[in-house]
Image (cartoon, helix red, strand yellow):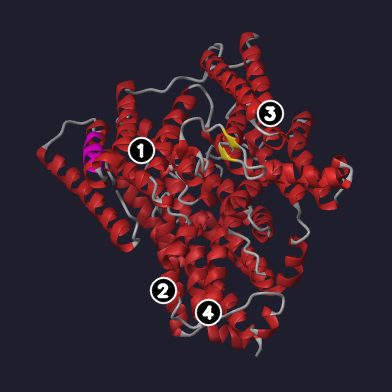
Amino acid sequence: MGSLDHLLAALTPLNLLLALAGVVAGTVIGALPGLTATMAVAVLVPFTFSMAPAAALIALGAIYTGAIYGGAYAAILLNTPGTPSAIATTFDGYPMARAGRGDLALTLACLASVFGGLVGAGFLLLLAPPMAAVALKFGPVEYFWLAVFGLTLIASLGEGSTVRGLIGGCLGLLLSMIGVAEVGGDVRYVGDFKALLGGIDIVSALIGLYCVPVLIELVATPVRHLEAANQVAGFRLREAAAILARAKFNLARSAVIGTVIGILPGAGGSIASLVSYSEAKRTSPRRDNFGRGEPDGVLATEAANNATVGGGFIPTLVLGIPGTPPDAIILGALLVQGIRTGPTLFTQQGPIVYTFVWGLILATLIMLPVGLLIGRFAFRSIVAIPKAALVPSVALLTVLGSFAVHNNTAEVQQMVVLGVAAWVLGQLGFSASPIVLGLILGSIAEAGFVQGHLIGGAKGSVWAEFLGRPISQGIMAFILLGLLWPWWIKRRGVPQEVPHD
Amino acid sequence: MTEPARRPDLPGAAGSALMLALGAAALYFAREFSDLGAVFPRAIGAFLVGLSALYIVLVASGRTRRAAGPAGSHLRRAGVAAVMLGWAYALPALGFLASSAVAMTLLMLLAQHDRWTPRRALGVGAGAAAVLIGLYTLFKLALQVPLP
């Protein structure tokens, strides 16, 4: 059975319908703050148990890819990432929306997501086994350096002050330590609040840190919350295509970063989007525009987070190790279907796997018209809704979203307390993004550091363990490059491009 | 456009002082942890103390610029914060529908700057009620989330 046969098998009316329904359902769920891609897949997975294996996989892949993309809507229009993968989309997406370019940001997010999704699926189709083997070489030390690489982005998120950004990052790292330690089992910084034993939930924290300050500021003045796009009709596709053509290297690099990070078990879309954003900013001639509505920022994060879908399936299918949390649920669904994942999957059950990969590619392509249409509807709706209706509705979503993660009212309280604290800190000049970055990367950095420390101690040299491994050295080189590049550019006096906003 | 007057970042210094205290507290409580569990808290707590002290020094030496304060009503801002906190803590006792109905009504009043007309009140109120009932139905019945 050749590639054409697998493509034709994926093109049955039922599979196309499932891909369409999956993309729509995933996009809508992903757009709601608090409802993650993991939840979208988990909620809808029982519907696939009675389907044929390939059809079930296509439906789940479509839901997953739609949910990752859907997270961009709330990120761009409400400054609240619909899913953790869309954190970095808020950095430039929301400023674009505030400046009356929200429709363009949504179109760019859609195009970049489709591109990233196709690149990830392409890697899955062509390079799955060798890339999975590379992923196995990542140990705790490599994860530690990867987290440090993500943390270097803090330096650029301080909104005018690197020191303030680093202080915010340290606060996020401290927040990530609350609860039972992953290594060692110490109960840390919980006090008498038993609800904190499980730590601070990332999704609830994200909703609170990003959304509550926006709600508080929305009511303060009577001015419109978002500017409507003036004198521009349609999807602004021509404008978006021109930006895409200019940013082709950024797109390609971000999609590859997303795929590679997706392959790493446990890393996922949030880290992929942060790392690709950092790289896009570092290499851009308009780096001073980042954080103020730079389209390249939206392109980088959305291409990367959707590329993690295909990337994450590589270790899931080849090794039986889920690359991302939704992959873990899909892995469970595969076992229910009687499919044993592993190195022989592509040879023994090739028709199912290759039909699924083609189905994923088709679902990603379907995301283009679906995403553009939903994006336009979402933008017009959010712009037209009066504040008196928007504020309580968004507030309701924050409460529902933070409760629905673990059905726990304590997490709603955490969300609001963190949100109010973020607003107070914002008034003192500390932005939320470095805090979020520290919170997300803290557990990965700590687990990698402590495990690496233990392994190095057992081997006789902690320094050799941390500094002597080739992959670690490669990541360290990128860290140094990321830190020193802006300084070097500044010293050389390379002129910045004139802001086009 | 003229450059705004350079003023010391006193709010930033106040925030840094708060962070310095948090870092010191993190270091203090890290004494109770095992060696393995204390490595990271100690490192990050020390970084937080050092960076906060550095920022205070930068403010004192006049090397920072204070951002312009936000415009608008502080009373409304405080109102939203109070309503959200009240909502979160009343949720277990009052239940989802009752607490949400009260909180959403208060937020509606806080967010409306123009004069209320019967038509506007009806439109906004009906819209918010539809969102509440719609999302309640979606989460409770379709997604099987056990709302309180």
* Marks 3/2: CA–CA distance: 48 Å
Tell me where residue A200 appears, x and y as whole percent. Answer: 51, 40
Picture layout, residue B30 above or below residue A116: above
Q: Chain of mark 4?
A: A
Of residue A130 and residue B39, the one placed in the foreground of this image is B39
What's the mark number on residue A225?
Answer: 1
- Residue B66 horizontal side relative to residue A101, left or right: right
Question: Is disc 3 in contact with disc 4, using a CB cutoff of under 8 Å?
Answer: no
**Label 1 or label 2, whichever comes before in sequence order:** 2
* Marks 1/2: CA–CA distance: 39 Å
* Marks 3/4: CA–CA distance: 48 Å
Dot 3 amino acid type? Arg
* Marks 3/1: CA–CA distance: 42 Å
Which residue is pictured at 49% across the width and 83% down the height?
A: A52
Of residue A253 and residue B103, the one placed in the foreground of this image is B103
Local packing at callout 1 (Cα closer than 10 Å; few below 14, some 14-19, many 20+) is many
The mark lying in front, picked from 3 and 2, is 3
Of residue B130 and residue A372, the one placed in the foreground of this image is B130
Which residue is pictured at 61% across the width and 79% down the height?
A: A353
Q: Which residues are magenta?
A: B99-106
**The magenta stretch spans residue B100:** yes
**Could one spot residue A442 in this view of the protein?**
yes
Q: Identify residue for label 2.
A: A47
Q: Identify residue for label 3.
A: B42
Dot 2 amino acid type? Phe
The mark lying in front, picked from 4 and 1, is 4
* Marks 4/2: CA–CA distance: 12 Å
Q: Secondary structure at mark 2?
A: helix
Q: Secondary structure at mark 4?
A: loop
